[in-house]
């Protein structure tokens, strides 16, 4: 871990030059999600589920599984992964979520599909709809040029000593940081932001980064733009968050 002071390959390095590095160019997308909470509640029965699938097919999206548990319509496909969840979390609101776990495609491709889902949703449930809140979740993995991502976070990024962890009396397998960042002003239209930066327990050399953004400002369904929200979130995750991990500024 020590002695990595340069990078002959020219890859982007994020981290102090005296220790480990987060390898920015190794970014791997493991989750894209965008959605909204709205009112009034949609009717979630078998007939509407069928009409929704037909509207999605007209947009070019087909699914291999369809479930209609009480108060919900859940559609999914395995390759490339995509899930649509339309739910009634409680009166008087509904919730629409478009999710791709290990997406196997670019953010741009996912954003296009999210727009298709929204178009099919409007075709199936026409009429006036008020959006109460919007949200995006993005998760990335990064390689670390060292033996352990938590060691990088603890010793190199936070400048702490390994001996301090002995207070727990047991070996620490991993861990990380969590930040909750409110808007600078309640009327600014800025989102609430939550960031998690952790070692990835399934592979200790990888760093797990999760960004959640929530926009609580109400608006019409026509103002709900999944692509814009995804791009704003991705920019924050790959600029401000990456800059923080490296200990620098944007």
Image (cartoon, grey):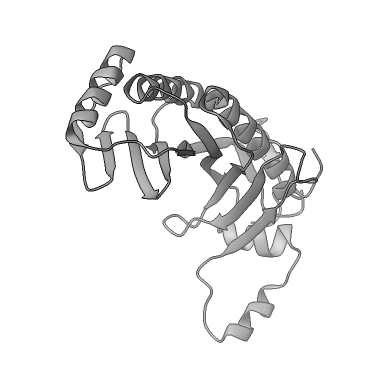
Q: Position of residue 52 (x, y in %)?
A: 27, 25
Picture residue at 63% right of the left edge, 78% below the top:
165
Picture residue at 55% right of the left edge, 45% below the top:
143
Q: Position of residue 176 (x, y in %)?
A: 60, 62
Choose top left, top right, bottom left or bottom right for residue 250: top right
Q: Position of residue 205 (x, y in %)?
A: 52, 53
92 w.r.t. 24: above or below = below
Choose top left, top right, bottom left or bottom right for residue 178: bottom right
Front one among 141 and 183: 183
48 w.r.t. 3: above or below = above
The reply to whether residue 5 is in sight is no
Q: Position of residue 232 (x, y in %)?
A: 64, 31
Picture residue at 58% right of the left edge, 84% below the top:
168
- Count the numbered circles shown: 0
The reply to whether residue 72 is in sight is yes
Which image quarter holds the N terminus? bottom right
């Amino acid at each position: 871990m020590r002695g990595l002071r340069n990078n002959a390959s020219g890859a982007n390095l994020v981290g102090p030059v005296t220790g480990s590095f987060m390898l920015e160019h190794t970014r791997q997308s493991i989750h894209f999600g965008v959605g909204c909470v709205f009112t009034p509640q949609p009717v979630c029965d078998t007939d509407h589920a069928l009409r929704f699938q037909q509207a999605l097919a007209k947009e070019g999206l087909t699914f291999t599984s369809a479930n209609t548990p009480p108060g919900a319509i859940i559609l999914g496909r395995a390759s490339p992964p995509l899930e649509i969840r339309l739910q009634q979390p409680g009166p008087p609101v509904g919730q629409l979520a478009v999710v791709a776990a290990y997406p196997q495609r670019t953010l741009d491709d996912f954003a296009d599909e999210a727009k298709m889902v929204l178009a099919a949703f409007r075709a199936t449930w026409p009429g006036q709809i008020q959006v109460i809140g919007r949200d995006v979740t993005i998760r990335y993995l990064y390689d670390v040029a060292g033996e352990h991502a938590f060691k990088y976070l603890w010793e190199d990024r936070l400048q702490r000593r390994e001996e301090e962890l002995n207070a727990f009396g047991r070996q620490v397998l991993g861990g990380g940081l969590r930040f909750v960042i409110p808007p600078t002003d309640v009327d600014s239209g800025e989102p609430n932001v939550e960031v998690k930066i952790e070692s990835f327990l399934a592979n200790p050399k990888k760093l797990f980064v999760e960004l959640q953004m929530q926009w609580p400002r109400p608006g019409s369904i026509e103002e709900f733009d999944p692509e814009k929200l995804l791009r704003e979130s991705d920019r924050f995750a790959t600029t401000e968050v990456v800059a923080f991990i490296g200990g620098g500024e944007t």
